[in-house]
Image: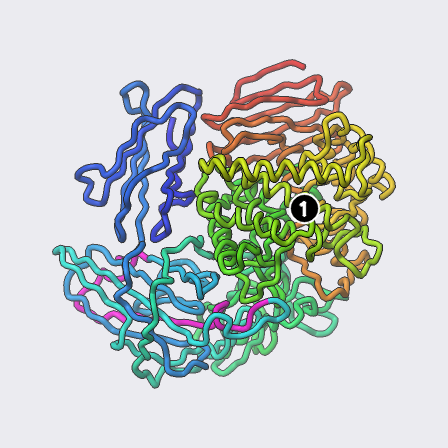
């Protein structure tokens, strides 16, 4: 028996994060199930006396909620012990470290007097004449920054400080820089490099605008040094720093970057000290954006148009890194695209995003990369090189927020496997501090609707609690300014359009989904006022007290059943969709209020939800159980959100099946219906039909894109036409993730994780077998540990099923095997035989 992982607020050894509602989770690996007691002890660095010690946890719990008044800039050591009676079986240690918390900055914001500089550098030289015990850097910069000590980049994250509504809150990063000062009696150079980023550069919907949050690149930093003799020193940004323009001549998120390595850094001058408030500075919530892997070149192509193109074999987000071998003065131009057309390079679907990297060589052989932008691409066109291209000189850096992969599904069908890989690659490409819609064109915004419909799938694939807690705050920050309205995307970049169903309901549904998966109420506590504010906003805006009518709606976005193909909202009644989500959000707020002990709120919102539900039923469902809206999405919503009386469910399911038969058993759903259509079919006895729809390969279907070579999820069902030509619609991304929400159905009904209690303390394991997918293998890393499944339907007359389960310590599993008569089950290496 051992403790395999300890998480602090769902992170591994966090430094400088906001640690409100401190929670410590752990996982146990054991060969046998035995009752053990669990104990937590916390020390500060000196480890003289514990600052916190718990009573023993009961057997079934695997987390501690810690009530501890934390001190700023302090490292806390954690030890968890497992005990049998009073004997310690095993222990595990880890740590976390606080940032500045509410401590006021003594440093000043510094800038260059020229606001038009594209890459502002700040420099200071220091001398340390005593051995250093520890050193920390607390800093941020706007728009984006990187910081260096003696020419070495500090930290392994990029595009800091991330994206927020910078006029409301700016995140501070904490770095352990002790190893940078191992040498004494020498001069050290501190350097900060900034660029426009999301803060100042051209950004926003339809190409965006400049200077949304400010017009001056700036930085603020404190270097805290503790010497081995116990003395301390603090070095801050102030008037003693110098500044100049750097080698990046232009940089922006959509534009890309121009880097001239021939430029010499000179003309240093005193900084401008900005007398600006620092009260918007906060310890970070954002997970670091990191290079998660490098992809090698798969193919070097000479196109029919005589272009040189690198194919990395995978659509993804990040940047190109290359080894420079070019002579001084050589100008290299790199352009990116998602697809080839007639064998040639293509980038028209990027719209106004220039999305290029231009590099002028200084003649030195070295690895080169962009610094303050990123790209969505599979293909790279190269111009200007004087030497033949060598594959080993290029690599694609895949970067995204630092989340652990937690789930996977594999079958014997390679196309299905490719689809599920595409879903995960879509998530990797778009979970980029906020959940963006796409990573390539002139948009890349934190669209609320995409995030909401995909949030459950996201939580199967990766550990996303911390990621969504930050994004939930982004939404709440906007709502505070907008009287409860949820904008179309967050941060809103000054665009306050919004207030639509499904998209706006991200304010309630995302926090609720995260609580259901991880069992942590912290995100509900953080967002509860704004969850209420959203439901209250609907109540003020609707024309009907208990239905949501009379306001702008996206409908079932990009559905295929609309009477006018030019309108992307689909055929499902927009007021019906809006009212269903009004009901569901009211219900969530009622349940959240109950959890957080807001008794009156719980009563009021429960009554509101009940009234909305009854009104929906009267308006849209006849006494005989006929749904007034005959669309796939309408049936899916009515069944998924339990709007149908029990005695009428069979009728509604039958009508859905008839509707699908009329549609040739193919999808017509858009953003709203797609996540639920297969789930309700499998739940209500139509798994065979759900599997048929899932496995369709002609348009419209999930595997249609796979057959056409997709390596991520497309925005449209027909983003690419059957002949391989791009759909000419202006809105056409090949790297959207929302319709990849089908993977939730895969986890639930193929892998078998059909239902669970809050935090996965109990699981209903019920795979729905189908001979067309006779071998399924996968896992989900629950808050208790990895739940792994592997089954094979044998090619025998009686179709014997061999099923292997690995159940983590502390989870109760209820096994229900529909349509399975001959099953051999092995659970944690113990065999059970029977029908």
Residue 625: give x, y in percent of width and height.
Answer: 80, 32
In screen coordinates, is 227 left or right of 22? left
Percent x, y of residue 588 = 56, 40
Question: From where the camera sits, is residue 357 visible?
Answer: no
* Outermost residue, right side: 662
Residue 775, image quadrant? top right
Q: Residue at x 54, y 67 (%)?
A: 494
Residue 678, image x, y percentages: 72, 38
Residue farthest left in this picture: 229
552 sits left or right of 89 in the view: right
Look at the picture and state if 13 lies above or below 482.
Answer: above
Q: How is the image coloured?
A: rainbow
Q: Residue at x 44, y 53 (%)?
A: 287
Tell which residue pokes out farthest to the bottom in this image.
Answer: 267
497 vs 740: above or below = below
Measured along the vertical axis of the image, is residue 579 above or below residue 322?
above
Secondary structure of residue under mark 1:
helix
What residue is shown at x 60% (from left), y 49% (from top)? 505
Q: Relative to residue 778, is residue 555 drawn left or right?
A: right
Q: Which residues make up the magenta segment?
A: 175-204
544 magenta-colored? no
* Residue nearer the viewer, 178 or 524: 524
Q: Is residue 176 magenta?
A: yes
Local crowd at mark 1 within 10 Å, few (<14), some, or many (≥20)? Answer: many
């Amino acid at each position: 028996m051992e403790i395999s992982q300890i998480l602090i607020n769902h992170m591994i050894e966090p430094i400088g994060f906001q640690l409100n509602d401190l929670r410590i989770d752990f996982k146990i690996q054991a060969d046998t199930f035995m009752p053990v007691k669990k104990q937590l002890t916390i020390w500060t660095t000196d480890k003289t006396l514990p600052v916190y010690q718990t009573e023993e946890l009961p057997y079934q719990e695997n987390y501690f909620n810690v009530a501890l008044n934390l001190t700023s800039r302090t490292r806390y050591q954690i030890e968890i012990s497992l005990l049998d009676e009073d004997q310690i079986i095993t222990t595990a240690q880890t740590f976390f470290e606080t940032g500045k918390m509410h401590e006021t900055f003594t440093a000043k914001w510094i800038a260059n007097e020229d606001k038009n500089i594209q890459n502002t550098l700040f420099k200071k030289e220091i001398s340390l004449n005593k051995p250093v015990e520890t050193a920390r850097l607390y800093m941020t910069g706007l728009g984006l920054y990187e910081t260096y000590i003696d020419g070495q980049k500090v930290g392994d994250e990029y595009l800091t400080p991330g994206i927020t509504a910078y006029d409301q809150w700016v995140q501070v990063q904490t770095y352990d820089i002790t190893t940078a000062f191992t040498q004494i009696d020498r001069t050290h150079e501190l350097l900060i490099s900034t660029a426009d980023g999301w803060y100042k550069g051209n950004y926003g919907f339809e190409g965006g605008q400049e200077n949304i949050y400010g017009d001056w690149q700036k930085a603020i930093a404190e270097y805290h040094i503790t010497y081995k003799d116990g003395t301390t020193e603090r070095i801050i940004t102030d008037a003693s720093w110098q500044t100049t323009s750097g080698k990046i001549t232009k940089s922006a998120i959509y534009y890309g970057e121009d880097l001239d390595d021939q430029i010499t850094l000179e003309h240093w001058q005193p900084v401008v000290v900005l007398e600006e408030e620092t009260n918007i500075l906060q310890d970070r919530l954002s997970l670091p954006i990191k290079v998660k892997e490098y992809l090698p070149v798969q193919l070097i192509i000479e196109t029919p148009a005589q272009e040189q193109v690198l194919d990395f074999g995978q659509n993804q987000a990040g940047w190109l890194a290359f080894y420079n071998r070019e002579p001084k003065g050589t100008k290299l131009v790199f352009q990116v695209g998602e697809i080839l057309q007639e064998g040639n390079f293509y980038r028209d679907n990027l719209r106004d995003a220039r999305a290029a990297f231009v590099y002028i060589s200084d003649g030195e052989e070295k690895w080169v990369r962009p610094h303050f932008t990123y790209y969505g691409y599979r293909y790279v066109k190269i111009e200007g090189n004087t030497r033949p291209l060598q594959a080993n000189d290029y690599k694609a850096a895949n970067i995204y927020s630092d989340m652990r992969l937690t789930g996977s599904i594999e079958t014997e069908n390679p196309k299905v496997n490719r689809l599920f890989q595409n879903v995960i690659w879509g998530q990797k490409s778009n979970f980029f501090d906020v959940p963006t819609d796409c990573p390539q064109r002139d948009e890349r915004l934190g669209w609320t609707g995409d995030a909401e419909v995909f949030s459950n799938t996201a939580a199967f694939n990766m550990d996303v609690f911390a990621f969504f807690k930050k994004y939930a705050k982004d939404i709440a920050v906007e709502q505070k300014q907008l009287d409860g309205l949820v904008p179309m995307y967050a941060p809103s970049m000054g665009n306050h359009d919004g207030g639509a169903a499904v998209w706006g309901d991200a304010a309630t549904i995302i926090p609720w989904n995260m609580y259901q998966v991880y069992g942590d109420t912290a995100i509900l506590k953080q967002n509860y006022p704004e969850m209420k504010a959203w439901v209250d906003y609907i109540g003020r805006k609707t024309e009907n007290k208990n239905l949501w009518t009379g306001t702008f709606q996206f409908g079932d976005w990009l559905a295929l059943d609309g009477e006018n193909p030019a309108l992307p909202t689909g055929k499902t009644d927009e007021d019906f969709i809006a009212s269903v989500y009004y009901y569901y959000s009211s219900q969530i707020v009622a349940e959240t209020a109950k959890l957080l002990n807001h008794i009156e709120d719980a009563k009021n919102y429960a009554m509101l939800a009940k009234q909305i539900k009854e009104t929906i039923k009267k308006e849209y469902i006849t006494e005989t159980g006929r749904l007034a809206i005959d669309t796939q999405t309408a049936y899916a919503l009515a069944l998924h959100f339990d709007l149908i009386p029990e005695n009428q469910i069979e009728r509604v399911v039958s009508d859905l099946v008839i509707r699908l038969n009329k549609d040739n058993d193919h999808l017509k759903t858009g953003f709203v219906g797609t996540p639920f259509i297969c789930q309700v079919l499998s739940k209500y006895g139509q798994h065979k039909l759900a599997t048929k729809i899932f496995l369709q390969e002609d348009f419209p279907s999930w595997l249609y894109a796979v057959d056409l070579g997709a390596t991520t999820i497309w925005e449209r069902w027909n983003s690419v036409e059957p002949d391989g030509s791009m759909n000419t619609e202006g809105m056409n991304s090949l790297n959207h993730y929302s319709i990849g929400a089908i993977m939730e159905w895969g986890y639930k009904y193929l892998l078998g994780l059909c239902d669970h209690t809050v935090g996965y303390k109990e699981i209903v394991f019920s795979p729905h077998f189908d001979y067309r997918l006779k071998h399924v293998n996968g896992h989900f890393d629950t808050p208790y540990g990895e739940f792994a499944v592997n089954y094979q339907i044998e090619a025998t007359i009686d179709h014997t099923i061999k099923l292997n389960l690995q159940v983590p310590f502390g989870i109760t599993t209820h096994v229900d095997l529909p349509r399975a008569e001959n099953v051999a089950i092995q659970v944690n290496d113990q065999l059970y035989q029977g029908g």
